[in-house]
Amino acid sequence: MPAFVYRAVDAAGAERKGVIEAASALAARRSLRDRALLPVSVEMAAGKAVSTGKTFSLARLRRPRVSARALATLTRQISTLVSSDINIEEALRLVAAQADAAAVNSLLLDVRGAILDGRSFARALADHPSVFPEFYRASVAAGEHSGRLADVLAHLADFVENRHRNQQKVQLALLYPALLGVVSMGMMVLLLIYVVPDIVKVFVSRGADLPFLTRALIALSSGAQSYGLAILLLLFIGGFFGGRWLAVPANRLRMDAFLSRTPPIARFSRQNNAARFASSLATLVQSSVPLVDALHAAAAVTPNRHIRARAQTVAMRVREGASLQAAMAEAAVFPSMLVAIVASGESSGRLGPALGRAAAELDRELEALVSTLVSLVEPAVLLLMGGMVLLMVLAILLPIINLNNLVGM
């Protein structure tokens, strides 16, 4: 049954808000009246308005937003309950009852309602793609198919937590260079618009022969004054249409293929995707998920669509009877170390532990690579901003020095 968010008034005139499960909006209102509540508005928890009272808010049309940390927490709670032999419908109800955020509560009740209507857990999650990404739904589907849903959910909780932790680490490391770059660029733009023109007037009134660097600065200042807003507008329009262009799957596939082949980005892209693929595949294989299903679910984890397509090809080749090592070697997108460890795991009959070791090694290499790249960003920004400021100072000082030389003569 779907979930509905309601706003009602009790017998004393106090406003009540909450979430209720019902077959329809009419049934939800009837249930509220049975509780001695007068319904003011009733709408589906997913965000589609069913009926409203006198007031209307655009916020009601928004789908629930759940942070990565909240997603990891509720995933781990559901995993714990399911592993305790509690069915998924009851687990969702219990986690929803404990949720502090109304968005999480309504989301879980809506998923539970879809399951009660006869849909699988994975298909119920598909109604909320902004909260449950493709890799999440694919892993849940594999866990349902193999009967190891609790193990898969535990892996998903670890995966979401680690991804959130790594993203926070990178964002905090890049915060200072980003602030430095923004402040420096802002200061230089202000100098070009408000300071340089006044200095130029002095040079022009003296009839001085300006050096090339100063003439270039004057041209840049004039362009910023005359066309600054137009340039900003063009950048905004270019970013908008660039985002629309990347939203087309074929264009996104071309861009991802370019990133996976162009050094030095290619090394980081392949390492990141291989680490995610190996980690997910190791957990699913060790959870007794069939290899082909595990490969499809692990492929959905890879963010690069080009590498994801190659990983899906690996699953097809394994379904046709090829060995995993041969299929991964044919894909030509995975590190040779991973292919070699897979080959040894297949030969020994211990593919799961071998994939676990490979995933741990890839994660260590990826963390070292990310730390190196992040540590290089700060000095690079400092050197770039310092060089630009130096050029601006030289462009202003050189004519002054020339004028002093002329006076001295």
Image (cartoon, rainbow, N blue to C red):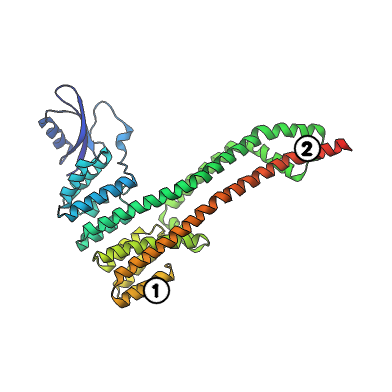
345 left or right, relative to 115: right
N-term-proximal mark, 1 vs 2: 1
Residue at point 44% right, 58% down? 367
Residue at point 28% right, 48% down? 73
Q: Could you tell me which secondary element the residue under label 1 belongs to? A: helix
Q: Where is residue 344 in the image (x, y as percent from the top left)?
A: 35, 75
Which quadrant is the N terminus positioned in? top left
What amino acid is labelled 2 in the image?
Ile
Disc number placed over residue 312 in the picture, else none: none
Asked if residue 100 shows in the view, the reply is yes
348 left or right, relative to 275: left
Which residue does the numbered mark 2 point to in the structure image? 400
26 left or right, relative to 325: left
What amino acid is labelled 1 in the image?
Ala
Q: Where is residue 90 in the image (x, y as percent from the top left)?
A: 15, 48
Which residue in the rendered view is the most extreme toward the left? 34
Residue at point 18% right, 49% down? 91
Q: Residues within 10 Å of mark 1 (few under 14, many from 20)?
A: some
Which quadrant is the C terminus positioned in? top right
Q: Could you tell me which secondary element the residue under label 2 belongs to? A: helix
Q: Where is residue 18 in the image (x, y as percent from the top left)?
A: 21, 34
Which residue does the numbered mark 1 point to in the structure image? 340
Residue at point 30% right, 74% down? 320
